[in-house]
Amino acid sequence: MSDSKTRPVLVPVLGDQLTRKLASLRGRTKDDTVILMMEVWDEATYVKHHKQKIVLIFSAMRHFAKELEQAGWTVDYVKLTDGDNAGSFTGEVARAIERHDPRAIHVVEAGEWRVQQAIEEWPDKFECNVEILDDDRYICPLSEFREWAEDRKTLRMENFYREMRRKTGLLMAGDDPEGGEWNLDKQNREPPKDEMDPPARPIFEPDEITQECIQLIEDKFGDHFGSLENFGWPVTSDQAEKAADAFFKERIEKFGPFQDAMVCGQDDLYHSMLSTSINLGLLDPLDLCERAEKAYKDGKAPLNSVEGFIRQLIGWREYVRGFYWHFMPGLESDNKLNAQRGLPEFYWTGETDMRCLSDSIRSTRENAHAHHIQRLMVLGNFALLAGINPKEVQDWYLVVYADAYQWVELPNVSAMILYADGGKLATKPYAASGNYINKMSDYCGDCKYSVSKKTGENSCPFNSLYWYFMDRHRDRFESNQRVGRIYSNWDRMDKSKRQDYLDTAEKFLDSLTPADSSWARAD
Ligand code: FAD
Ligand code: DLZ
Ligand code: SF4
């Protein structure tokens, strides 16, 4: 053993921790630190991620390692195909200990339960001292969320969000919210307009490093879902800043009003398209919120757009993270609505005559992205109404989106769209008939199905599935203050009409081909 003073500290940096502001890197000196970055098979294959997602993470990791090296840090970068092939984080850390004989390991807590469980075994497994640090890139530490949650009978994002506004001082006028209201969501529900022409987001041409990753992923994971043709995600913090600049210059003004709008073939609309960069660590969410607030103060964006953007970041994003850690591991297996149907194959192939779904899946396949309202009210709404089993829906969302990590995917899927948690996150299920999609999009005009037809041949499937769902779960939802009222509409219909709805829904569901599980996980 060498002298403990000359033995370095080993700092493993995981694929979604790509910032020099990381707690384990702050304050460290270069001559006494070895940064370890690992491309590992366990992470690349625990589900069969969209090809763009793996390229994005590997390319961003390789760029970050290069940046660190150029700044004088020692980086031990393990590539997926190095040596005998890199297997798991724990295995690679063990090998790195042999190479570097560190006096300690400093690691920031993992974003995901699965990985954190493994990290928590390190102190017993390894002889050197292991320090697991809080991930202070978030505004609300997990201990603070736990305290907040334990004091309450019911958890509501809105209450949490107000706390975060007070904590950060964002959009506050003294003790009151700027403009007098905390939440301007009601102003953010404009349907699309005919002349909508949002400026395109910047696309970053793959450089040599990204090209290498594309080659590797085509080679090793060629059978995974998704296309690599459109790859243009930011892979460095400089590129991510450019993407943010474009959003604040060109799109934030209309972000609010058209937040819930959907237009066939227009994949970005006025959304920021920044989630991949934020989740990787390339952008700091608080910094983005401050830029949004400045846009409002400088008169460049209206309050409803800026408040809406800030709410997504310090409200929803922080809230779902706290919610995830508070309810794991149970959240993963919750199925309070006892949904048992298999995921339809069209989620993978896009082959359905339902235009809203086929367009959302096309965007998902081409971009590894769909915007929020497509994820929630088209893809999610269908899975809820059709009673698709949560595990298969969770896997799908985790595979297909470039911004998907379980801490953010699972609460959105299990709790927000599927109500599988029994209502801990949402006060009511986000169930809607074709009417909602027709109002908020231009999908229905050219659809094979008729949105105005309620039952029978060619009627919009969302219409009959809606009542099929509400009828199936009457016991649970009749007493719910926010949805219970609709049962009087149901009861007012004559019996044969009600039966028509149920028969139409069942006939439609029977016509669906279930997906093969090998789309999501290797056998
Ligand atoms: P914008 O519309 O510009 O919003 C700004 C930012 O707010 C986003 O970048 C994101 O960081 C944050 N945000 C917005 N809504 C949410 C939310 N509900 N939860 C957490 N953060 C939010 N987001 C992910 O980052 N990863 C996921 O795996 C993911 N899965 C989702 C699954 C479902 C079923 C639903 C309904 C939503 C999911 N979201 C997820 C949230 C949201 O759809 C995406 O963050 C958003 O579409 C990303 O695009 P954007 O950056 O243009 O977002
Ligand atoms: C998602 C992902 C993938 C596909 N591959 C890697 C990898 O090889 N190495 C790595 O450090 N991270 C990867 N990630 C992101 C991790 O899954 C993520 O950092 C942790 O799971 C968060 O807990
Ligand atoms: Fe979707 Fe129904 Fe509209 Fe077709 S008619 S696009 S299925 S909502």
Image (tube, rainbow, N blue to C red):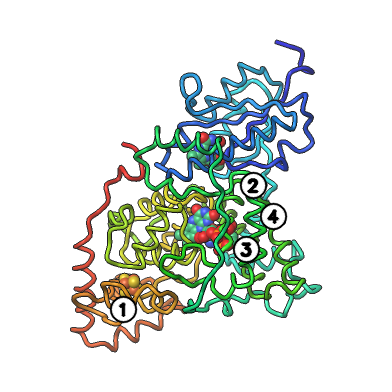
Q: Secondary structure at mark 1?
A: loop
Residue at the spot of label 4? 139
Residue 114 visible to an observer of this rendering = no
> On the image, which quarter does residue 148 sit in?
bottom right
Query: What amino acid is found at the position of numbered circle 4 in the picture?
Result: Ile
- Ligand 3 sits in which quadrant? bottom left
Q: Quadrant of the N terminus?
A: top right
In space, the residues marked 3 and 1 are separated at their CA atoms by 34 Å
Figure disc tally: 4
In space, the residues marked 3 and 2 are separated at their CA atoms by 20 Å
Residue at the spot of label 3? 315
Q: Nearer the viewer, residue 235 or 259?
A: 235
Q: Secondary structure at mark 3?
A: helix
Q: Secondary structure at mark 4?
A: loop
Whether residue 143 sits left or right of residue 209 in the image: it is: right
Residue at the spot of label 2? 282
Determine crowd level at label 1: few under 14, some 14-19, many 20+ residues with C-alpha closer than 10 A: many
Q: Are marks 2 and 4 in contact (CB under 8 Å)?
A: no
